[in-house]
Amino acid sequence: MAQVTLTIGDRSHLVACADGDEPRLERLGAMLDERWPAARRAAGAGASERAMLLIALMLADSLDEAQNAPPPAPDGNDPTLLALAERLEALAETLEQDAPGA
C-alpha cells in the first residue's frame, strides 16, 4: 500500500492508497488545495474543519452540475451521425422509388 502526502492550504495530510494510484490522489488533492483560499475566507479564521466542509460542498456542487447538465448538442461533423444520415437518405430514396404510384 502506497502513501501520499497531500498539502491542502497550510496543512499536510498523509493518505494511504493503492499502489499506482498516487498520481490520481495527488490530482484530487490539488483540486482541494485550489479551492482552499476561497473556502478559508468563507469559513473565517481558525475554522479549518468548516473550510474543508465548504470545499466538499463546492466539489459536490460541481459534480451535481456535471451530472444534471443537458447532454451536449450533436456535432454536425460527427462521422457516425453523417454516415447514419446518408444511410437514412438512401433508404428514403429506395422507399420512394418502390412506393406504388411513384
Image (cartoon, rainbow, N blue to C red):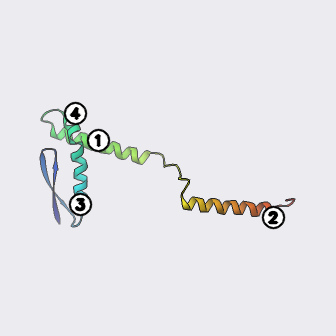
N-term-proximal mark, 4 vs 2: 4
Residue placed at 26% from the left, 44% from the top?
A: 56
N-term-proximal mark, 3 vs 4: 3
Q: CA distance from mark 1 to mark 4?
A: 12 Å
Label 3 crowd (10 A; few <14 / some 14-19 / many >=20): few
Residue 2, image x, y percentages: 17, 64
Query: Would you place residue 43 above or below residue 74 in this image?
Result: above
Residue 71, image x, y percentages: 48, 49
Element on which disc 3 rests = helix
Q: Amino acid at mark 2?
A: Asp
- The answer to whether marks 4 and 2 mark residues whose Cβ atoms lie closer than 8 Å is no
N-term-proximal mark, 2 vs 1: 1
Q: Amino acid at mark 3?
A: Pro
Residue placed at 78% from the left, 60% from the top?
A: 96
- The answer to whether marks 3 and 4 mark residues whose Cβ atoms lie closer than 8 Å is no
Disc 3 versus disc 4: nearer the observer: 3
Q: Which residue is mark 2?
A: 98
Q: Nearer the viewer, residue 96 or 3?
A: 96
Q: Which residue is mark 3?
A: 23
Q: CA distance from mark 4 to mark 2?
A: 71 Å
Residue 39, image x, y percentages: 22, 38
Left or right, 45 with respect to 75, comes to left
N-term-proximal mark, 3 vs 1: 3
Q: Which residue is mark 1?
A: 57
Q: Which residue is mark 4?
A: 42
Label 1 crowd (10 A; few <14 / some 14-19 / many >=20): few
